Image: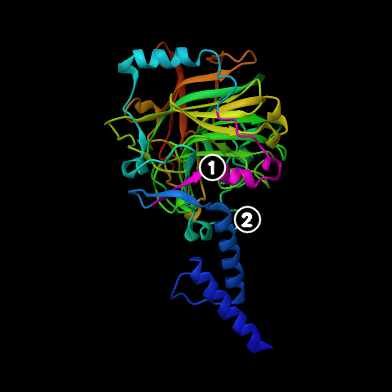
Amino acid sequence: MRAHASVVFVVAVVVLICFGVWPAGATPASAGDLKKQLAVGKHLRRLNKPAVKSIQSPDGDIIDCVNIAEQPAFDHPFLKNHTIQLRPGFHPEGLYDESKKASDAGNNRTNIIAQLWHQNGRCPEGTIPIRRTRRDDVLRASSVKRYGRKRQMSIPRPLFADPDFINEGGHQHAIAYVNGEKFYGAKAIINVWEPDIQLPNEFSLSQLWILGGSFGQDLNSIEAGWLVSPELYGDNNTRLFTYWTSDSYQATGCYNLLCSGFIQISSEIAMGASIYPVSQYDGSQYDISILVWKDPKEGNWWMQFGSDYVMGYWPSFLFSYLADSASTVEWGGEVINSEPDGQHTATHMGSGHFPEEGFGKASYFKKLQIVDESNNLRSPKWISTFTEQSNCYDIQSNNNGDWGSYFYFGGPGRNPNCQ
């Protein structure tokens, strides 16, 4: 019986090697290792759909061009017979007025930004680009089940900022926010940097949050922006990302296309792929435009990247509160502070410099806008700001004719005034 089990074990390892899940030459330590590798293999086969074409990116990523109807979203049982919506029923009123202003005011535009993989090719029409998930990506996660998911308690809670909970869950923020109304979308132009990350399990991001429900177990969130996460990607590249959850990061939702949910329609932009180039301190500045809005006809939540790329949508059935509207919108930065050696992390937020240094040195969000109940894209009437520890990461907001509602934010983390 023992001999039979050994044979099964060896055969299973050979199968894993053939499928590329277990590296040739590696020695399996136990049946527990084998079970984990089998789970990893199954997960990879679920995520990595058959490619029409594959593109090797200069940063080492492989971008698979996958038939639009075979993307991971359609693994969801409620999407088995879904008819893909190839364009939104409505855009927010005022969106194209804003785009025209931006194109007319050339001196207000920063440099053109793209994705690194574009240097080596593009995906054909009828396909979408998906960053291929590798074995090592999944193994870096705390478990196969948690791969591609945020930890709980990652939402800034400005109205509940009890000093006892300053570093709750290890997340720290510097944000602007609006609440007290019904919101149907949000937009911002976000300065792009490549912040230093102290430890592999930490990250730094700049994003907008569309929130519904309480800040308890039922929170709905749609998120988009840029992220540096060695744990998720295995490097320190700045990457475009989205996220969603309908239960406060417990069992639902994920980054990008790492679970079924978000339906992508763009063949041009890959979620999770590197953004290039990035801003330099006292040098060239780059930014990206992110818009998320609710189509008043179909009810789905759409995302647009830049002025040209409608990325896709989150079907409204994924959510409870957001099936109707959002109650809070937030813009800003977030880092993980794992308190290495009992001290505050030295992971940077934004550029790694405090807001008072200003343009070209501190990171910014500009042209903050919300979509109101009349489907109008407009500046918020007011914004509030929040940070847990301003000596570590800070935020300063303002308003002017060129940038509308804007703020500078960020910081270096650990410093003489932040221990």
Viewer-closest of 408 and 295: 295
Viewer-closest of 270 and 209: 270
- Would you name the residue on which mark 2 appears? 145
Mark 2 vs mark 1, CA separation in Å: 16 Å
Query: Can you give x and y, in whole percent of width and height, for residue 357 in the image?
Result: 35, 28
Identified by mark 1, the residue type is Asn
Say left or right for 408 vs 70: left
Q: Residues within 10 Å of mark 1 (few under 14, many from 20)?
A: many
Query: Can you give x and y, in whole percent of width and height, for residue 2 in the image?
Result: 66, 88
Image quadrant in which the N terminus is located: bottom right
Q: Residues within 10 Å of mark 2 (few under 14, many from 20)?
A: few
Mark 2 or 1: in front is: 1
- Would you name the residue on which mark 1 appears? 256
User: Residue 238's image quarter?
Assistant: top left
Q: Is residue 29 above or below residue 301?
A: below
| Any part of residue 377 in sight | yes
Q: Is residue 222 above or below residue 17?
A: above
| Any part of residue 178 in sight | no
Q: Sequence order check: which comes first, mark 2 or mark 1?
A: 2
Name the secondary structure under disc 2. Answer: loop
Q: What residue is rendered at 62% in x and 23% in y?
A: 295
User: Residue 25's image quarter?
Assistant: bottom left
Name the secondary structure under disc 1. Answer: loop
Circles 2 and 1, Cβ within 8 Å, touching? The answer is no
Region rendered in magenta: 61-86
Q: Which disc number belongs to residue 381?
A: none
Viewer-closest of 82 and 263: 82
Q: What residue is rendered at 31% in x and 27% in y?
A: 111
Identified by mark 2, the residue type is Lys
